[in-house]
Amino acid sequence: MAKLKSLLALFTLFTILVACSARKTPSTTPRTSTIIAKKTFGNFSGHVCDAERYSQLGMEIKDFAFCDSSLSYQVRVKDLIDRMTLEEKVRQLGDTAYGVPRLGLPLYEWWSEALHGVADVGQEGSKATYFDDIVPGATSFPNVINTVASFNETLWKAIGEVVSNEARAMYNLGHAGLTFWSPNINVVRDPRWGRTLETPGEDPYVVGVYAYSYVRGLQDIEGTENITDLNTRPLKVGACCKHYAAYDLDMWLGANRRTFDARVHQQDMVETFQRPFEMCVKEGDVASVMCSFNEIDGIPACADRNLLTDTFRGEWNLHGYIVSDCDSVKVMFKNEQWLHDTPEEAVSQALNAGLDLDCGFYYKNYTGNAVLQGKVRESTIDNALTNLYTVLMRLGWFDGNKKLEALGKSDICSKENIELATDAARQGIVLLKNANNSLPLNPDKHKTIAVVGPHANATEIMIGNYAGNPCKYTSPINGLSNYAKVEFHRGCGDVACKNESMIYQTMEAAKNADATIVLVGLALEFEREEHDRTDLLLPGYQHQLIEQVSKLSKGPTIVVVMSGGVVDLSHAKHSNDTQAIIWAGYPGQEGGQAIADVIFGKHNPGGRLPLTWYPANYTDMLPMTSMQLRPDDALGFPGRTYKFYNGSTVFPFGHGLSYTKFAYNLKKASRKVDIKLNKFQHCRDLNYTAGMFKPSCPAVKVEDMHCDEHIEFEVEIQNKGKMDGTETVIVYSVPPENIEGVHIKQVVAFKSVFIRAKETATVKFVLNVCQSFFVVNYNAYKLLPSGGHTVMIGDKVLSFPVQIKIKDH
Ligand SMILES: *[C@@H]1O[C@H](CO)[C@@H](O)[C@H](O)[C@H]1NC(C)=O
Ligand SMILES: *[C@@H]1O[C@H](CO)[C@@H](O)[C@H](O)[C@H]1NC(C)=O
Ligand SMILES: *[C@@H]1O[C@H](CO)[C@@H](O)[C@H](O)[C@H]1NC(C)=O
Ligand SMILES: *[C@@H]1O[C@H](CO)[C@@H](O)[C@H](O)[C@H]1NC(C)=O
Ligand SMILES: *[C@@H]1O[C@H](CO)[C@@H](O)[C@H](O)[C@H]1NC(C)=O
Ligand SMILES: *[C@@H]1O[C@H](CO)[C@@H](O)[C@H](O)[C@H]1NC(C)=O
Ligand SMILES: *[C@@H]1O[C@H](CO)[C@@H](O)[C@H](O)[C@H]1NC(C)=O
Ligand SMILES: *[C@@H]1O[C@H](CO)[C@@H](O)[C@H](O)[C@H]1NC(C)=O
Ligand SMILES: *[C@@H]1O[C@H](CO)[C@@H](O)[C@H](O)[C@H]1NC(C)=O
Ligand SMILES: *[C@@H]1O[C@H](CO)[C@@H](O)[C@H](O)[C@H]1NC(C)=O
Ligand SMILES: *[C@@H]1O[C@H](CO)[C@@H](O)[C@H](O)[C@H]1NC(C)=O
């Protein structure tokens, strides 16, 4: 407990220093801090253009064209901005936009978070969301790294829909804003990254699909998803894809995210770092994106016009606003001392680059002077405000929305919402080992179970970070007690497990129980924002706890790991004393129920690892600060993620077992694509291994193609076992052999299907040839190579060749 308190003190310090690192430990009792939040939020929860409101303010609504709903958003937003003085405009450029009393425009807090449930993360006094007696909690879903393990897009969107219902209900109760700076979609380049738990894993395509599914769940209002005028498309809440770009290092040895200069090869930029953001904007139509603290090749991300304006708005057609990570404009001046700028210069660099909103005070404090000094045009500020107010118009902040206004207290923590949280936790659980089919346990046979380990009674640990107050908790011992008599021993004082003297009691319990469940893993003190890991091991004596308990255990020993990042479980994997291993991530408020449902077979697990589980020695081979994903023989770097790492793993990306067996059968498959180039499409060279066959036209640039070629195939999947189950089909493409410097394989599609025992399901896939078979070459072109590609399902469960023939004109 003392450790927890000192940790909290540390967090408080971060809160003061840098807003975005704010983090609090949830509690079910209201905190005093809510008072401050209430005061600054001003309790505004209605809509701006409310005639009664204006008359209470002594004004008439008809005097303000921006409130005239018969006019277009464009005209109304312009009217609003044109009425403001420069000074008034500048006061709207921070996360707390002060409003303009003389225009009846109230204060708006831009900062809310909803990574896996409505969270009250943020700086006291400038966050919109808070919990108190009226709204004591919100549904806490599993952390994103778990949810993504379900490989179920429907689930990802469904969670977004429930979270935005609760968010909108909290707005109606004056307890939240309408703009939520979630999700975090940075690719996990290195297993040491402290924020792995917040993310959808290491594959850029999977991360991108998660991003747009969750964003659509949060933002879309039924019936308006397909409106083509993106400047007026209504929003339920505004989401935000963050942090752009190449941001995946927090605090590792001496390297700090605020000053870290990520040296990025453009090849990796296109292939890995930018791809999820591109998908989030293009497929998700996200209302906002956030730039990161770090520099990329010497330029702070939030001051890079190429990254912000040219790419987001120009190339990808962003309709929304760009916000900074909290205080990153200040960091540019203070920490990075970029170009030895003055604060006014830093502010103008960011505004001119296309950063609309500063989470912090620099814009508000220095933009006025920057205009006076001739560094920023007032029209640049107008553009930023146009992006901001257009989003607020789309959210109904000005006009209201009858249907959404009906959401209230009973829509928060409802029975259905909690059930979805439980189901999400079940879907995200990954069965890593199940020797001799030891699982599931049988409640008639396993009547007394020893439940041991530092996470056996996990509550707060299950909800991870960027969390709010959950509705309630179901801890593992609560969940398991529904099936058997539980004998509980922690085995360690805490998660750090620095004292082995408590292990003895757990051994005694294991000797007498019908089965032993050992709950181990990490916690936020080992992996979090501002804190990367330096190794991949279980903390303290946890490893010894597993070993000693499993040696003496009368029944089977099941190890359950809670962690965001990977841990080296080689020993338990190979040990004949450990029968099963389950990865449960940080499974959210109902995690204990989900774990119990899996262990006792009420739910047959179907989750798959969204990360490569490297052996512990991986971290000795390369520093976290090297950004490249490809192996580097000269430096001895082994490559990163399943796409480029070809070394041994503890468990590979995509690994996950089931209680039943599935058999595959390829039904139909198109295997040939002929592409004839016209005179404006030119053959591109590729590096082939010397002496190996190389097609006469090795490749064509994807951007030169129409990209309307597809290949289709169907697989029949039979559940051969006795239990209903979910099979997760992950489809990869493998480029032709002997092309140098390209990925080993890449995910191009996935689908999870529920199949009853003895039944068969047919799953059809349609792959766009450009999107599924491209490679990124050294010079960062996306190319479609000719030759023999392979489509592969799972870990070579099934594969077939696809011949792409490109003929020159
Ligand atoms: C918040 O708003 C409600 C309804 O408009 C009002 O009854 C209440 O007094 C307000 N509370 C505060 C603290 O301003
Ligand atoms: C995917 O998630 C949805 C929503 O929770 C659920 O209804 C569906 O059964 C899931 N699919 C599988 C195969 O589990
Ligand atoms: C929007 O488009 C999608 C995909 O074409 C379609 O499935 C959906 O029904 C459409 N929604 C509406 C409201 O038209
Ligand atoms: C911004 O100005 C306010 C009010 O003058 C001051 O309290 C605050 O410290 C300033 N913040 C920064 C980051 O300059
Ligand atoms: C489990 O943790 C909860 C919450 O911290 C606590 O109230 C409860 O007493 C613990 N249970 C046991 C058996 O220690
Ligand atoms: C380990 O725990 C035991 C029992 O709680 C305690 O007596 C002992 O002082 C602890 N040792 C250390 C090194 O903390
Ligand atoms: C586990 O048992 C098998 C035989 O059942 C044996 O081949 C293997 O070496 C044993 N593993 C270990 C780590 O002892
Ligand atoms: C599985 O069963 C075999 C044969 O009974 C045994 O040798 C082996 O140790 C068992 N493996 C585990 C991990 O329990
Ligand atoms: C790293 O560990 C793995 C598994 O323990 C082993 O197979 C591999 O040889 C080791 N690699 C090096 C470079 O030591
Ligand atoms: C081949 O690789 C080298 C770097 O190793 C690069 O300079 C060259 O541009 C590549 N050629 C092609 C055709 O991609
Ligand atoms: C992976 O490494 C093995 C052993 O070095 C090698 O035989 C194999 O070709 C490599 N695979 C790829 C795709 O690089």
Image: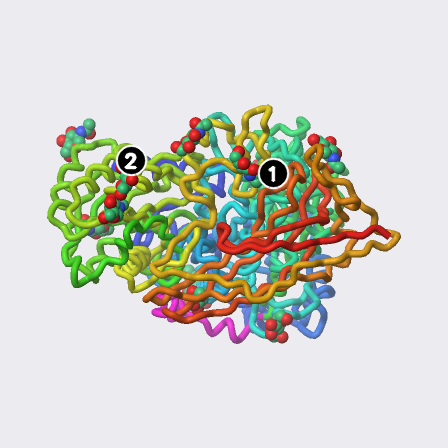
Name which residue lies at 40% across and 59% down: 427
Image depth: mark 1 or mark 2 in front: 2
Q: Nearer the viewer, residue 314 or 368?
A: 314
| 663 relative to 238 in the view: left or right | left
Say which amino acid is labelled 2.
Answer: Ala
The verdict on residue 227 being magenta is no
Whole-percent x, y for residue 378 in the image: 74, 47
Ligand 2: quadrant of the figure: bottom left
Closer to the N terminus: mark 1 or mark 2? 1
Q: Which residue is mark 2?
A: 496
Is residue 95 found left or right of 466 in the rendered image? right
Say few, some or many: other residues with alpha carbon within 10 Å of mark 2 (under 14 / 14 to 19 / 20 or more). Answer: some
Give the magenta range: 400-420
Image quarter where the N terminus lies is top left
Q: Quadrant of residue 632?
A: top right
| Residue 392 percent location from the top left of the image | 61, 61
Here the colouring is rainbow
Disc marking residue 329 = 1
Disc 1 from disc 2: Cα separation: 37 Å
Left or right: 728 as drawn, with respect to 800: left
Residue sitting at x 42%, y 42% = 565
Name the mark on residue 293.
none
Q: Is residue 467 above or below residue 168?
A: above
Label 1 is placed on what type of residue?
A: Val
Ligand 6 within 8 Å of the CB at mark 2? no
Secondary structure, magenta segment, majority class = helix
Q: Is residue 216 above or below residue 686?
A: below
Identify the element where label 2 is drawn. loop
